[in-house]
Image (tube, coloured by chain):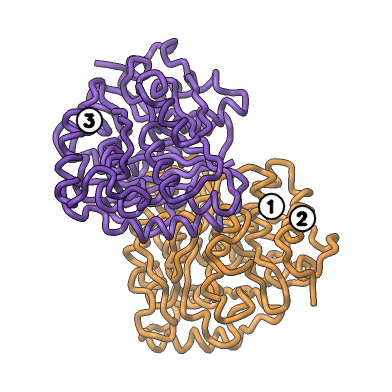
Chain colours: A purple, B orange
Amino acid sequence: MRLILVAGTTATAEIDGISAAGADKDLLGHTPGADAELLTYGDVVRAPEVPMSPTGCPTPALVTRAARELAGFDVVTVDGGLGIPTGAPTVTVGARPGGDIREQDPVPSAPGAFEAARQFGWKLPAEEFVLGETIPGGTTTALGVLRALGEEWSVSSSLPENPMELKEEVVAAGLEASNLQTGDAAGEPKTAVRRMGDPVLAVVAGLTVGALETGTRVVLGGGTQMLTAAALVRHAGIEAPLSLATTSYVADSVPDFEAAASALDLGVTVSDPGFDAVDHVGLASYAEGVAKEGAGMGGALALAERAGVLDDVAAKTFDSLQRLEVDNGP
Amino acid sequence: MRLILVAGTTATAEIDGISAAGADKDLLGHTPGADAELLTYGDVVRAPEVPMSPTGCPTPALVTRAARELAGFDVVTVDGGLGIPTGAPTVTVGARPGGDIREQDPVPSAPGAFEAARQFGWKLPAEEFVLGETIPGGTTTALGVLRALGEEWSVSSSLPENPMELKEEVVAAGLEASNLQTGDAAGEPKTAVRRMGDPVLAVVAGLTVGALETGTRVVLGGGTQMLTAAALVRHAGIEAPLSLATTSYVADSVPDFEAAASALDLGVTVSDPGFDAVDHVGLASYAEGVAKEGAGMGGALALAERAGVLDDVAAKTFDSLQRLEVDNGP
């Protein structure tokens, strides 16, 4: 079994108040590469440190890595527009860092990356794979894509208080800059992601379309960004079965999550890693609704559940936090 | 445990009669990427086919993959100057495809790639790793480096008849073009590899130096190209323990192999995968002295031996040849 992590960046993350991925703005650009390094090696290599949210919540990549160590699946990272070279090995599909969606054409590499990822999805020798994403600011660009497609659902946040008003403002400004009305890109996934999205969504959607077209099963591992990727796949006219694996933290806190998954005809798996029982402030904050998902965490938990090791993930994650000397609270 | 494959190209391979890696010149450039894909996925993805020598000997990458499936080690590919995008994920250290060593400055990216690989070697979280290489034409560039360093040993070949005269001619022309006498680059590994080598040797040597400098153990998995990498490491002034794992096909056929390993103070492991007992013309040709090594095969066999599964590698390789529908002889 293989988990494919698509890692990239969008300048949308630099808008004040948008993202919790990386406590410090200087570190924000390192987060996706750091996540890929953690999944590959169990530690950062070229990235300066393990990503933490402003409130001390460690990156979900640590949970995905812990699940990987227990369940023994492979990881491949696809470059979905990384801005800084990572020490993790990456597959290139032509994605470039995404611009701020308040610009007119923020992701010109999206259509090409979608097609290259689709071809990669055709050729990948696998019966099934799990997809994950890591892109700071990704829920805002996901919201932009949903509105461009004409879908009414909401998105999650890695912050304790989801700044939905700010996100809606940014998306409204983006639609205006792109000269689009809500729903104008319905049935045109490449346009939606080019004008209102990010390069990671383009690559995730393209990979999924290519895999489904050749009979490979895909599990989207994540929250509302992966719901958005699924919407792109459906708007590409692909009706094949598709599933989504997320955490209980997303499923319990996003009001219309089940309705959206059902409307997109997705099989949904929800896993609870039981972080409320772990004596670590950073992990406990997951149970309090911070972070929730990312870096394929939901998909990795589903694989851990299949392998019968889900109950060991919390302790394994705690061990790696100790080993990596990540602070346990203020 | 992790095997790091360094994959790249040199225009030296395009000289008539030099390389057996890829039966067809059009396919030669695809060989290193194909090897990386085979190690990562068990099949080619973007490469057009499984590499075969002109006499029908399949790439040693299939053996490394078989050993990986049995022994369960990770694989990371480092881009050592690939000319064509591969579907395997790769780490970038700034290596560019190498030129023909009969030019004056065939590998200008070598010093920078050596240093970037060295830094990657410093940071890689591991107690030990195995290194492999895949570069068509690599024994000729290895010979060039040995002569530039002033080392007198010979090199192996993946062809049934090692074209040593041709290789010596090419190296003599290279030394002349670089205005070097034999031994002029002694103690100057970056100069030796820049003027007479290839980008893969630069990356392998840099990675090894960086790892040894930070106390990480390195096993060089391969034949005379890895001996040459070890020579570069010693000429960089690194005296730390270093070992080399190769196949019985190299150890039995390269006359001064043991003497060279001893002079370089290398611990040597030799593994026999027992291909003479397998009913496959392509694999039997390994036992007849064709191919011999490559794509980390010797290192992978050593890991299989440690894991107690060496005896299963031949059958596993045979199975994958059947699955991939690689021809069994003419």
Mark toward the viewer: 3 or 1: 3
Q: Which mark is residue A265?
A: none
Q: Are discs 2 and 3 both within one chain?
A: no
Find numbered disc 2 in the image and state the secondary structure of the residue it sits on: helix
**Residue marked by disc 1:** B66
Q: CA distance from mark 2 to mark 3?
A: 50 Å
Q: Callout 1, which amino acid?
A: Ala
Residue at 70% x, 82% y is B161
The mark nearer the N terminus, 1 or 2, is 1
Give me the chain letter of mark 1.
B
Image quadrant containing the C terminus of chain B: bottom right
Q: Nearer the viewer, residue B179 or B45?
A: B45
In screen coordinates, is A306 left or right of A280?
right
Residue A82 visible in image? yes
Q: Quadrant of residue A311?
A: top right
**How busy is the neighbourhood of tag 3: few (under 14 within 10 Å), some, or many (20 plus)?**
some
Q: Callout 2, which amino acid?
A: Asp
Q: Is residue B29 above or below residue A40?
A: below
Estimate the x, y position of residue A74 in percent, counting from the top left.
55, 42
Q: Quadrant of residue B18?
A: bottom right
Give me the chain letter of mark 2.
B
Q: CA distance from mark 3 to mark 1?
A: 43 Å
Estimate the x, y position of residue A126 in percent, counting from the top left.
60, 49
Q: Are discs 1 and 2 both within one chain?
A: yes
In screen coordinates, is B209 left or right of B132?
left
- Give yes or no for contact between labels 1 and 2 (Cβ–Cβ under 8 Å): yes
Q: CA distance from mark 1 to mark 2?
A: 9 Å
**Residue marked by disc 2:** B319
Q: Quadrant of residue B324?
A: bottom right
**Residue marked by disc 3:** A23
Q: Callout 3, which amino acid?
A: Ala
Give me the chain letter of mark 3.
A
